[in-house]
Image (cartoon, rainbow, N blue to C red):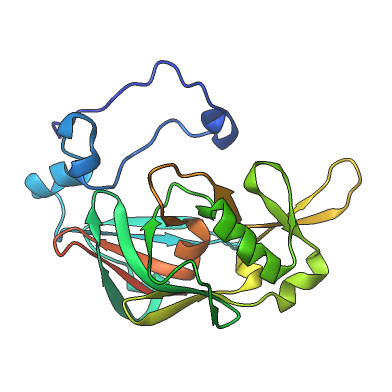
Amino acid sequence: MDQTFAEATEEPGLAFVAGRFDGILGMGFTEISVMGIPTVFDTMLAQGAVDQPVFSFYLNHDMNGTLGGELVLGGSDPNHYEGEFHYVPVSVVGYWQMTAEAIKVGGVTKPFCNPCETIVDTGTSLLAGPKDEVASIMEDYGAIPLILGEYIINCTLVPDMPLTTFTLNGKDFDITGPELIIETVDETTGQHLCLVGILGLDFGPIHAWILGDPFIARWYTEFDVGNTRMGFAKSR
């Protein structure tokens, strides 16, 4: 494969220290590629290395599971989803971006999304949204703010958390309370802490919600490069 990669010789943040990974493989569109360099998947397509212009992700949040996740290049794996895919067109070619008709909490539509933009991103460990919009949802949860846009909730309240729903191309995609929670233990006190997997951020010029790992874990995600669309099916 004749593929150009970039070498990072200095990284000022803590992401690579905390994440313990060696690099980033961009799976977006060439339109946002530095210097317009073809992406790895574009190169694979050009060389006929994959059967279809599609790649798919399965993520397993069951820490006791034998398989943490699966990336399929050139198709999808029916062993990891049920039913048919529901497809949503890409709204802006660049990121894997699509328009949500609504965001609902407990079945009630939030006023800030009518409609709004979302970006599906496997490289984001949580869901993320504009700070004020996330704060509004956290009020519905009864969550408590921490520093850096994070929130915790009393662990006893998690089973009764309302559904969080993203309406995409006419279909509702729910995420339950437990599917949004990251449970940790305070090393000092031994107390169980429940971190809500939605982060409030200042996005600057990009006003969109990022649907990261909690969404993809719930909904098996197919990235259809050939048809410029995304498909979602319930993960097994």
Residue 159 visible in this rendered orientation of the protein? yes
Tell me the quarter of the picture where residue 35 sits: top left
Q: Say whether residue 168 is left or right of residue 125.
A: left
Q: Nearer the viewer, residue 106 or 44?
A: 106
Name the residue at 44% across, 42% down. 204
Q: Is residue 67 visible?
A: no
Taking depth in this image into account, of 218 and 115 the one nearest to the observer is 115
In the image: residue 201, left or right of residue 44: right
Percent across and percent down for residue 84 are 31, 82
The quarter holding residue 154 reads bottom right
Q: Residue at x 24, y 62 (%)?
A: 90
| Residue sticking out furthest to the front | 111
Eyeballing the image, is 4 above or below 50?
A: above
Q: Position of residue 150 (x, y in %)?
A: 66, 49
- Decide: is 25 above or below 208: above
Instruction: Report the side of 85 relative to 149 (left or right).
Output: left
**Whole-percent x, y for residue 79 in the image:** 38, 72
Q: Residue at x 47, y 56 (%)?
A: 212
Look at 52% across and 53% down and name the residue there: 130
How many dots with numbers?
0
- Give the position of the N terminus as an image quadrant: top left
- Residue at the extreme top of the image, as rendered: 9
In the depicted view, which residue is nearer to us: 205 or 40?
Answer: 205
Quadrant of the rendered image containing residue 78: bottom left
Q: Is residue 78 left or right of residue 234?
A: left
Q: Residue furthest right?
A: 189
Q: Please state the horizontal and vertical placement of residue 107, each as a whole percent of the image.
A: 56, 83
Is residue 139 depicted above or below 69 in this figure?
Answer: below
